[in-house]
Image (cartoon, coloured by chain):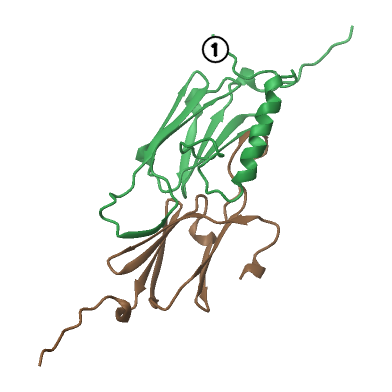
Chain colours: A green, B brown
Amino acid sequence: MALIKWKNKDLYDPWDDFRNLQNEINDLFNTDRSQGYTGLFDRNFSPAIDVIESENDYSVVCELPGIEKKDIDLTLASNVLTIKGSKKDDSEEKKGKYFKKETWTGSFQRTLPLPAAVNADMISADLKDGVLTVRLPKKEEAKPRSIDVKIK
Amino acid sequence: MKAEISENRKHFKACCNIFEKNGQVYLELEMPGVSKENLEMKIENDILYIHGKKTVNTDKGRFLLKEVREGDFYHEFTLDNTIDRNKIEATLSKGVATIVMGIKESEKPRKIEINSK
């Protein structure tokens, strides 16, 4: 049985206020920070990800500029999607004098738990212009269905 | 050029690398989601303008996680006299734009011969 990772959003969670405060402070310093660094406190690189849930599927959009398909490892295990990989840089000796270096290199990993059951056979992923888009269709029983109410 | 960009979309600077190699200046800009048709580069009065429009994801649905910044990339670079305007080339691959600018021959370091009398 899979662990349920998403809490009921209507319940009051006292830590929400602290989390919101930290997110707001991160956003304050985030406005012209280069992409990839999420806030003051995180030092590891983590690529920006959007997860959109529609009725029939999930879309996961991940920004990975300059990375080849073979350097990305995408796996799904019991509703947890893991994106990991590494971004190679040509060896430093080949490049000449650097005036500015804002891009990151190295390995990264993001794990995303998905709330509803996903149909693993129909997952598709595209890498175009440095953006990875993964579509995960939901299983039939996880789609929202309306239930007719009969009145006797 | 800034006035031509519509005010509706926010724009911010792309991550850039600037380095010099083999007598040329390389400028790398990370612009994920920008394809060749949406990338515009122009030089006017010694300023290099770069504008890249991101292809907008039009999926409808509920956002569970939203970290991707919405907006286009816009950058201005001032070119000085050491860059040869005729030797500028740009390529776009995997969301990274690489601009190679040649340095003028006269500006490269030259050895000066000493004549002894």
Which of A93/B56 is in front? A93
Count of labels in the image: 1
- Side (left or right) of A14 relative to B72: right
Single out the residue that lies furthest toward the left: B117
Q: Is residue A8 visible?
A: yes
State left or right for residue B37 relative to residue A93: right
Q: Position of residue A130 (x, y in %)?
A: 46, 47
Residue position marked by numbered label 1 in the rendering = A2
Amino acid bearing label 1? Ala
Question: Disc 1 sits on a residue from what chain?
Answer: A
Residue B15, x across and y down, in percent: 49, 53
For image coordinates 63% across by 42% down, the residue present is A27
Q: Position of residue B63 (x, y in %)?
A: 65, 34
Q: Is residue A60 above or below residue A148?
A: below
Among the 4 quarters of the image, the one containing residue A41? top right
> Where in the figure is residue A26, as x and y percent of width and height?
61, 39
In the rendered image, the quadrant that contains the N terminus of chain B is bottom right
For image coordinates 64% across by 35% down, the residue present is: A23
The single residue placed furthest to the bottom in the displayed view is B117
Horizontal side of B73 relative to A10 (left or right) equals: left
Quadrant location, the C terminus of chain B: bottom left
- Disc 1 element: loop
* Picture layout, residue B39 above or below residue B61: below
Nearer the observer, B33 or A137? B33
Say if residue B57 shows up in the picture. no
Residue at left 55%, top 39%?
A: A40
- Asked if B53 appears above or below A20 in the picture, the reply is below
For the residue pair B116 and B33, the one nearer the viewer reads as: B116
Q: Residue furthest right?
A: A152
Residue at horizontal 56%, vertical 12%? Answer: A3
> Which residue, as the protein is rendered here, is positioned at the far top?
A152
Q: Residues within 10 Å of mark 1 (few under 14, many from 20)?
A: few
